[in-house]
Image (cartoon, helix red, strand yellow):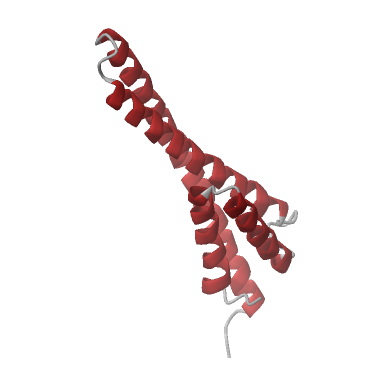
Amino acid sequence: MPLISKQREVQIHLSSMYDNLQISVEKMKKELKTHRSEYEDACHMHIKSGFQLEKLWLRADQNYQNKFREFETHCFLLDILTDYRDEEGNFIHLEEFILTLETLLQQFVRQEAYETCAVIKKWHDHITGNLFINR
């Protein structure tokens, strides 16, 4: 006989996932600042070189854009997950939450935003696979 119910186990895993997502967002904020500084440094170096360091500048720009997209997607997921959390901190309507993630995946595939899809898919798989929530 299990010591805790299946529902309670799911709630514990979701709370842990939520906490990890919050930690990831905070970590990405710092990384985003670093990437922004590197981008600004590359811009200054590009200008000072008489516009000879375009590859450095473009690489720094791409790195910043990639980190921003990752940060934005994680913030978006955190907002969605928060919407499915009640006042007591329990996660509700899990089937609807999973359906929301699947709908988002389809929308981002149509937009060819594959990096965003990869992040959403990772969290979707974590919920449906590790928590044994079947659809």
From this viewpoint, is residue 30 visible? no
- Residue at 27% x, 8% y is 50
Q: Please state the horizontal and vertical placement of residue 63, each as a whole percent of the image.
A: 38, 35
* Residue 93 shown left or right of residue 11 in the figure: right
| Image quadrant in which you'd find residue 13 | bottom right
Q: Outermost residue, bottom direction?
A: 1
Nearest the eye: 32 or 19: 32
Q: Please state the horizontal and vertical placement of residue 55, each as a whole percent of the image.
A: 29, 26
- Residue at 75% x, 53% y is 87
* Residue 55 shown left or right of residue 78 in the figure: left
Nearest the eye: 45 or 126: 45
* Residue 95 shown left or right of residue 62 in the figure: right
- Residue at 58% x, 91% y is 1
Nearest the eye: 56 or 129: 56
Nearest the eye: 79 or 69: 69
Q: Please state the horizontal and vertical placement of residue 126, each as a whole percent of the image.
A: 52, 66
User: In the displayed structure, would residue 32 be above or below residue 80?
Assistant: above
